[in-house]
Amino acid sequence: MTKIELASYIDHTLLAPDATVKDIMQLCLEAKRYGFKSVCVNSIYVPLAASELADSDVKVCSVVGFPLGASTSKDKATETKNAIRNGADEIDMVISIGAAKEGRFSYVSSDIASVVRVARREGDKLNKKIIVKVILETCLLDDYAIENCCLCAKKAGADFVKTSTGFANPKGTDGNLLPNGASEYHIKLMRKVVGAGFGVKASGGIRSTKMALAMIEAGANRIGTSSGINILDNFIED
């Protein structure tokens, strides 16, 4: 793999609540300089990112229902519509995690479908394909729920399943915090369920070149990280 190829896997991400206009402008400048696949931002910054990246091949990704996934399907659909009209090329939506934990997979599927329908409709108006990624928050789900949510994403017509928001706070029985990001185990599980022709995005806690490459080896074809520069700067081509 070359450095250019590795860069094409990366969604250069800044979702911090205190991100400023200056921060987003710097994010976009870095994405163009390094050749990242996209920048991933909160919807308030989609117009700015779209303007800053208009002269490049870098895509604009907006999160929807982020980070809890607990808004209504109608709200997620409206947020999706607005993000696309403001310049988003990709949508990373959070599922209803509570519904997934309860096994209400028909709701999970319809919730995803409500976003996909709007993304397809708005994309058709612009004559472009809007990519929809579905965030499962794997640290809060067991394997059975993860497998079924992957099937829901496929059924609903999405393009990717994604591990994490990076904002969850799972705790063990002792009350101590547990890992909340991507793992090779979950990437392998998700890839097994969705098959070779579907997208799998690893996100959350990916800060090193070694970890990014491990996620790709496990089956990820997109990496969400705020450490993309560090990952590339420390990558040694074969």
Image (cartoon, rainbow, N blue to C red):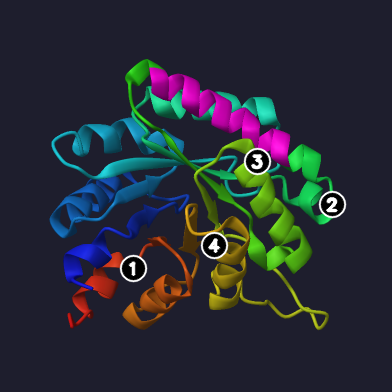
Q: Residue at x 48, y 20 (%)?
A: 121
* Residue 37 pos. (x, y %): 28, 52
Considering only order in the chain, which callout, 2 or 1, is on the residue closer to the N terminus? 2
**Label 4: which secondary element:** loop
Magenta run includes residue 34: no
The residue that disc 2 covers is 103
CA gap, disc 1 and disc 2: 34 Å
Relative placement, left or right, of 76 versus 206 is right
Q: On residue 7, which mark appears?
A: none
Look at label 4 and name its amino acid. Gly
* Residue 197 pos. (x, y %): 47, 53
The residue that disc 3 covers is 155
CA gap, disc 3 and disc 2: 16 Å
CA gap, disc 1 and disc 3: 32 Å
Q: Does residue 54 show up? A: yes
In this rendering, the label closer to the viewer, 1 or 2: 2
**In this view, 168 is above or below 72:** below
Considering only order in the chain, which callout, 3 or 4, is on the residue closer to the N terminus? 3
Asked if labels 2 and 3 touch by Cβ distance under 8 angstroms, the answer is: no
In this rendering, the label closer to the viewer, 2 or 4: 2
Look at label 3 and name its amino acid. Lys
CA gap, disc 4 and disc 1: 13 Å
Q: Residue at x 32, y 60 (%)?
A: 9
**Label 3: which secondary element:** helix
Assess disc 2: are there few (<14), some (14-19) or many (≥20) residues with their C-alpha within 10 Å of its C-alpha: some
The residue that disc 4 covers is 166
